[in-house]
Image (cartoon, rainbow, N blue to C red):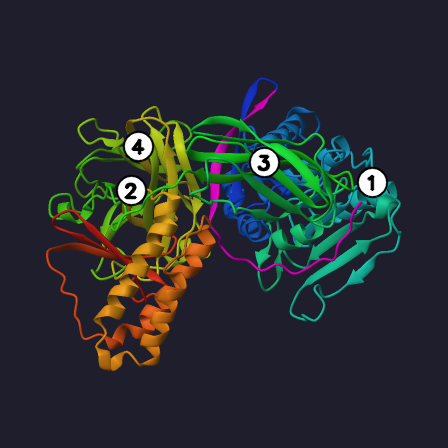
Amino acid sequence: MISAAVASLPLFIASASTTWEDVNVNGSTRKIKLHVPDDTPAGASLVIACHGMNQSADWHDGNSKWTAVSDTAKFVLVFPEGIDHGWDISGNRDVDFVCAIIDKMEKEQNINPGRVYLTGFSMGGMFTYHCANRISDKIAAFVPVSGYPMWDKSAYSTRPVPIMHVHGTGDDVCVYSGVQPTLDNWIKRNQCNATPEVIAPYPQGNPNRGATMYRWTDGLDGVEVHLLELQGKGHWQSEDPVYCLTSIEAWNFMKRWSLGPDAPKVETLEPETGSFDLPVDGMDISLTFDMNVESEGVEAYLEGEGGSVALTPSCSGNVLTLAVPAIAPGEYRLQVKNVKGENEGLMKVFRATYVFGVEEVGDVPPYNVIFHPDLRAEQNTVGEGIPTGWHRINSRANGDKDEKGSGSPNTGGARMKYFLEGGDFNEGFYLSARDYDRCDITYGKYPEYPLHFEKGKYVATLNSAFWNEGSMNGDVKFDFHIKNLAGTPVAAFSSLPSRYNLGEQAGRIEDSMSHRCEFEIPEEGDYLAVYSMTSGWSAVIVGNLKIETAMSQAERYKGTFLRTLNRAKALYESIPEENLSDAGAENLLQVISKYESLVSTSPSVYENATAELAEAIERASGLSSVMTVKADVVSEEYVDLLGRRVKAGAEGILVRRTLYKDGHVEAVLVR
């Protein structure tokens, strides 16, 4: 076992991908909710979090902080869906399910098979103990919450097992008195010290907490058994920041344990992932690891528009060099497999993306809007109903439905809402399942109102806000999917968060949550855009939907840089001679000179240069007497450097995109 110090873990929301996936289990198809944070490294940990009886993967996601912890700590997170909302806690049906999840995540998400962890709430906690006995060779540590074996509490795992149990003393479902008899068997099996260390209150230094930690230490292989006792808490997963954040405590325990040597980790990659304009006549790719590695058994290749290209690996110390032969222009994904470290740990798969061949960029960035509905236009005819081309269905698991079709006026329930102008968005859908199990609001179902895409890459932007305080405090989530006409998702953005509480009033929406959803359409055709909600009477307002073609890497980074450089030059040329000695003008000239000949393949180099130019432009912007007159402007919006729509005057470097009547778009960086 590998032990490491426990560190506190802050929470924040980062960009990520959440999707529903199928898992084949002995010929049967099971469902999981998969969450993968952006920039998750190769060899990341895997946490499998199981819901309680009569609950679901969505419920467990929405009532825990696991997603936020995953975004912070950069591990892969799976919420499995139990059959009939429960678990097999005596046989192998769901044990096999967990094994199949691990195999799938190892193959598809590059997880470290030595750092797989299992947790579960209530019946999911019972199932966690069941797996500790059955598959301790596959899972490094276990954290059952508010659940233990109701009958046979035996501990007969094939190896010593680290366990942290979390339970409230006021639990009236799985009563607290059953916890210690269960743990006693594991303390004995692991040969831990019979007398625990006691930390009360837990953590130390916070007298307002009613939590107590018991630690039975010094077991075989160094394993430990912990009990986090929550005084007065009932049958729920405590995510109270004043009292106890169960998900953080669970992760801080889990991450200390591993089934074997750690896989070598990539510390630097040259060229960095996302690099473009790379040479097509041959080059080297270098991966620097945190330990010495060997090239024997390494498989490395690029897959993309020019087919599959094998790379030749060689090693020197902790550097793996991959020789790239002549290659056809296009976008490729790098895959490196089976890199063995000096400690015998194995990095199964590492991935990066590259674009070979120089792409010319223009003065005006590509800007092809595919879908941007004017939902305000029908306020007088549809009112608080379902706009033309849209379809709403609220449904129950038993088949009951409440459907409202295109153009249905003043429907009540999930419907259009209108707000004071001047906010983040002025109209949007009130999205709520209400007294049904699910709500879906869809565009593209009607042949006369198609949502048509050509094959390629796109980006959808939208905003969301909470309708009321209960929805905000419950931190309810919604989904946005792009599906084919058969209803199969081609892009899934699940459990999207919101921000700002409208207080059930049709006021002005400010400081809402902006979402940027990038996706790829596999083949030309008609598709569906779908908002979904499964949280009963909770509600969010979603609107401001725009779908447009996505910029290439070269346009996003090199193009934005060149357009900013040209703007800086134009500003300097417009400064009167008497102002050229000003510090702002001199600084602007210095920065222009610094970057005038910049040629790079690196996104980060262009991004940093763009930011420095924008700073110089801001300092010198008041020195020019030349006024830019805008004529024939159709619309104007502001986005940040990641393309997320923001309000004018927001902090940071912004891009102002102006659409003119002749169809051309001007994009400039501003502050």
Q: Which residue is mark 1?
A: 160
Query: For this view, does 479 lie left or right of residue 75?
Result: left
Q: Marks 2 and 3, Cα distance to the nearest angstrom?
A: 39 Å
Q: Which residue is mark 2?
A: 547
Secondary structure, mark 1, is: loop
Depth order, front residue of 638/540:
638
Q: Marks 2 and 1, Cα distance to the nearest angstrom?
A: 53 Å
Q: Marks 4 and 1, Cα distance to the nearest angstrom?
A: 51 Å
Viewer-nearest of discs 4 and 2? 2
Q: Residues within 10 Å of mark 2 (few under 14, many from 20)?
A: many
Counting from the top left corner in percent of width and height, residue 2 is at 78, 47
Secondary structure, mark 2, is: strand
Query: Which residues are drawn in magenta?
Result: 1-25
Q: Marks 4 and 2, Cα distance to the nearest angstrom?
A: 12 Å
Counting from the top left corner in percent of width and height, residue 49 is at 60, 41
Query: For this view, does 121 lie left or right of residue 114?
Result: left
Q: Marks 1 and 3, Cα distance to the nearest angstrom?
A: 44 Å
Q: Which residue is mark 3?
A: 323
| Of the image marks 4 and 2, the number of the one nearer the N terminus | 4
Q: Residues within 10 Å of mark 1 (few under 14, many from 20)?
A: many
